Structures are given as structure tokens and as C-alpha cells.
Image (tube, rainbow, N blue to C red):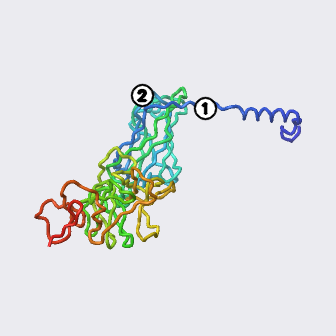
């Protein structure tokens, strides 16, 4: 018997036929796997403390309308929430022990399905469930699996986002007949328990630029030396600003400090708009971001060295990495390359740069609203669009 491999005993003619057949098979059109959209969805619970494992845990459940046999999805966790794992690593993802959804092997009492997990990157958890025997779930809805995580309290103590955002994508559900149903990708803010709400946020305005932008996750009084303004109008390339008496949570502002400002503001994080799952908040012509965001539209505050003053310059499609707590300008119209503002050294903002108001409100130099004449003391104030001096 020859010791040569079998393919060496084939003649060239047969080899050519085999090669042509393989190539033809490879060139055949592949039948796309049908994936049907569905309103069935995965849900994420709040965090609960698990004393036995010394960590937090949350549950992923299914709200469905049909019986499935398998599923998979990607969970994108926010910074500060970390999947906990043993040495190996073996990720702490377990089938929900109350077995609301999975079928049970009556002889062994074991789950009919197995769940596996991996982490393509630090904050992406990929979870898949299969049944080697193609066994159906016993219910259309119920708990699927638990995820065990740790919470970085130090990170959240200075976090701009009022409540962490979890994103789910890459989801599909498979029936016994191998039909695939695909829920829509979505984002949610499920975690409240275990997330510190008391925040200390650093605020800095350059003594050279004197102007900056700011958005905070909490309400705050304006500190001495820092004034804040909203923007709802323009005149040509000039921004018309309105003084603010205080900082409102999740609202964008332009801030001014004659000699610069460096300090921290403290408050309790709050979320005025519970439907917001982007950490991007708009008010008037300003849009603020509470997480690091790539911006390629609108106008970005920059000091390009021209005339020595910062201006809002058109992004012109270029990508800018806007840090958390900063804002950009989105005017409703106009083709100006840049928008400017006139600041007065004594009052912070020049009177002709303040948006016209129809009442007689009075503000002090910090932008705080004066509620009665009894509060007026010696100094300079702004009434409507004019300066007034109390001697």
C-alpha cells in the first residue's frame, strides 16, 4: 500500500473537476438568514446588594409574546460599573435561579439551557443562551440571568452624568423552528440603588479667556466671581445673553469670570428629564453634554488667537471631543463663521449684549435676581438692559 496521501493518487483531470466544483459552490449565492423585527424586549432591573458575593447584582429579563429557545445580546455598561469576575476569568453571569423562564429537566432538576458570557472590551458584556437539545422556554416572559457588578463610588462622586446609562444592542431571539426575531436597540437608566447622588464637580474658567461653558447634574448657587448666562438670540454675529440667577440641573450656560475661576461646586444629582438617555441637553441656542461627546456640528467655543478673545467657531464638520460639563452653540440660522460676545470688566457682560426683557427685573453682578428693593445695597446692578448704581 502506498504511503502517499490520497490526493496524490488522483490524476490531474479529477483534481481539476474537484477544484471547479468547490469554486462553483463558493460562488453560489448565500441565503440570508431571516430576521423579523419584534416588539418583544429585554429589560434591566435596578441594582441590588448581594451580601454573599460582596457586590451588586442586576437582572436581565424578557418581556415577550412567543416561546423561544435561545437568545443573545450585548450590554454596554457605563464607566463606573464593572462586571465582577473570578480568577480565570469566569464572568459572573448566572441563569436566574428562580427559573421563571427556563424549562427544567424533571430527572436531574437542572436547567435545560446554558448561558455564556464574554467581554469584547472593558464595558461591553456579550451574553448568549443556547439549548443543546433545542428545548423551548416554558414561558414567554420572565427573568433570564443575573449580572454581578461592582460600583466605583469614587468615580461617581465627581461624575457629571446624573444617572448612569445602559445600552443594549445586537439582540435576537430564536424559536424552536429557528426563526430569529430582533428587538430594537435601546438605552435606559435602570440604576439608582448604589449610585452616589452627592457630587463634587470641578469648575474652571481660564483667567486668560475669562469665558467658558458649563452644565451640571445638580442645582447650584453661583459662587462669588462667576456669572452665568443663557442664550436664546443673536444679532448678526453677536450673541444676546440673559443673566441667570443660579445654575439649574442639566441646563447649559455660558459662564464669565473676570479674573478666572477655579473651584468645585457641590450638589445632589437630579434628572429633570427622565426620558433623556443621551446625556445631551439643549436649552435655547446652547447644548450641553454630561458625558464626553464627539461633536461635529454647531459652534465650538475656542480661542484661536485672533483679537485675543474666545468665540464660538463653526465646527465645519470637523470632530471635536467635547468633555463632560461643556456646551456648544446651535443657532437657528445664520452663516457666520464665528459668534462673539461683549463682556464688560465691571459687570461681566455689556448692557447692549443682554437680551431685551419687558419687565423691570434687577440682577446683581453675579447674575442673582433681586426680589425686593430691601435687598439693594451699595453697588452696581442690572435692571432690564441698563446698569444702575446704588450709592
Quadrant placement of the N terminus: top right
- Residue 32, labelled with which disc? 1
236 versus 345 height, above or below:
above
- Quarter occupied by residue 324: bottom left
| Disc 1 to disc 2, C-alpha distance | 25 Å
Q: Position of residue 181 (x, y in %)?
A: 50, 31
- Nearest the viewer among 30 and 44 is 30
Q: Position of residue 226 (x, y in %)?
A: 29, 67
Q: Position of residue 217 (x, y in %)?
A: 32, 56
- Residue 380, labelled with which disc? none
The mark nearer the N terminus, 1 or 2, is 1
**Disc 2 target residue:** 65
**Residue furthest to the front:** 236
Quadrant placement of the C terminus: bottom left
Kindly identify the residue that appears in the image at 34 percent across and 47 percent down.
48
- Nearest the viewer among 123 and 381 is 381
373 versus 121 height, above or below:
below
Q: Nearer the viewer, mark 1 or mark 2?
A: 1
Kindly identify the residue that appears in the image at 43 percent across and 70 percent down.
307
- Crowding around mark 1 (Cα neighbors within 10 Å: few <14, some 14 to 19, many 20+) is few
Q: Position of residue 71 (x, y in %)?
A: 49, 36
Helix, strand or loop at mark 1: loop
Whether tag 1 and tag 2 are in contact, CB under 8 A, the answer is no
Amino acid at each position: 500500500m502506498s504511503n502517499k496521501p490520497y490526493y496524490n493518487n488522483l490524476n490531474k483531470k479529477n483534481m481539476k473537476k474537484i477544484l471547479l466544483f468547490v469554486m462553483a459552490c463558493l460562488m453560489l449565492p448565500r441565503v440570508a438568514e431571516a430576521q423579523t423585527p419584534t416588539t418583544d424586549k429585554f429589560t434591566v432591573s435596578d441594582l441590588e446588594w448581594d451580601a454573599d458575593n460582596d457586590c451588586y447584582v442586576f437582572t436581565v429579563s424578557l418581556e415577550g409574546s412567543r416561546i423561544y429557545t435561545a437568545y443573545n445580546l450585548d450590554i454596554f455598561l457605563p464607566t463606573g460599573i464593572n462586571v465582577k469576575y473570578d480568577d480565570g476569568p469566569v464572568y459572573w453571569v448566572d441563569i436566574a435561579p428562580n427559573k421563571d423562564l427556563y424549562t427544567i429537566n424533571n430527572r436531574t432538576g437542572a436547567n435545560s439551557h446554558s448561558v455564556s458570557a464574554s467581554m469584547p472590551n472593558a464595558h461591553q458584556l456579550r451574553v448568549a443562551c443556547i439549548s443543546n437539545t433545542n428545548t423551548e422556554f416554558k414561558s414567554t416572559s420572565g427573568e433570564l440571568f443575573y449580572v454581578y457588578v461592582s460600583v466605583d463610588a469614587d468615580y461617581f462622586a465627581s461624575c457629571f452624568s446624573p444617572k448612569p446609562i445602559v445600552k443594549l444592542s445586537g439582540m435576537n431571539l430564536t424559536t424552536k423552528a429557528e426563526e430569529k426575531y430582533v428587538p430594537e436597540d435601546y438605552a435606559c437608566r435602570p440604576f439608582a440603588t448604589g449610585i452616589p447622588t452627592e457630587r463634587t464637580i470641578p469648575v474652571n474658567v481660564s483667567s486668560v479667556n475669562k469665558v467658558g461653558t458649563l452644565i451640571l447634574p445638580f442645582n447650584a448657587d453661583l459662587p462669588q466671581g462667576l456669572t452665568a448666562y443663557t442664550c436664546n438670540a443673536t444679532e448678526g454675529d453677536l450673541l444676546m445673553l440673559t443673566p441667570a440667577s443660579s445654575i439649574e440641573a442639566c441646563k447649559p450656560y455660558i459662564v464669565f469670570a473676570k479674573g478666572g475661576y477655579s473651584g468645585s461646586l457641590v450638589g445632589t444629582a437630579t434628572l429633570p428629564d427622565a426620558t433623556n438617555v443621551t446625556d445631551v441637553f439643549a436649552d435655547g441656542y446652547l447644548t450641553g453634554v454630561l458625558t464626553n461627546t464627539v461633536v461635529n456640528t454647531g459652534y465650538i467655543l475656542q480661542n484661536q488667537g485672533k483679537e485675543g478673545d474666545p468665540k464660538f467657531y463653526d465646527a465645519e464638520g470637523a470632530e471635536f471631543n467635547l468633555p463632560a460639563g461643556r456646551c456648544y452653540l446651535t443657532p437657528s440660522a445664520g452663516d457666520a463663521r464665528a459668534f462673539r460676545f461683549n463682556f464688560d470688566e465691571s459687570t461681566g457682560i455689556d448692557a447692549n449684549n443682554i437680551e431685551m426683557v419687558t419687565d423691570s427685573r434687577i440682577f446683581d453682578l453675579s447674575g442673582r435676581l433681586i426680589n425686593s428693593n430691601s435687598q439693594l445695597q451699595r453697588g452696581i446692578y442690572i435692571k432690564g438692559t441698563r446698569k444702575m448704581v446704588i450709592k
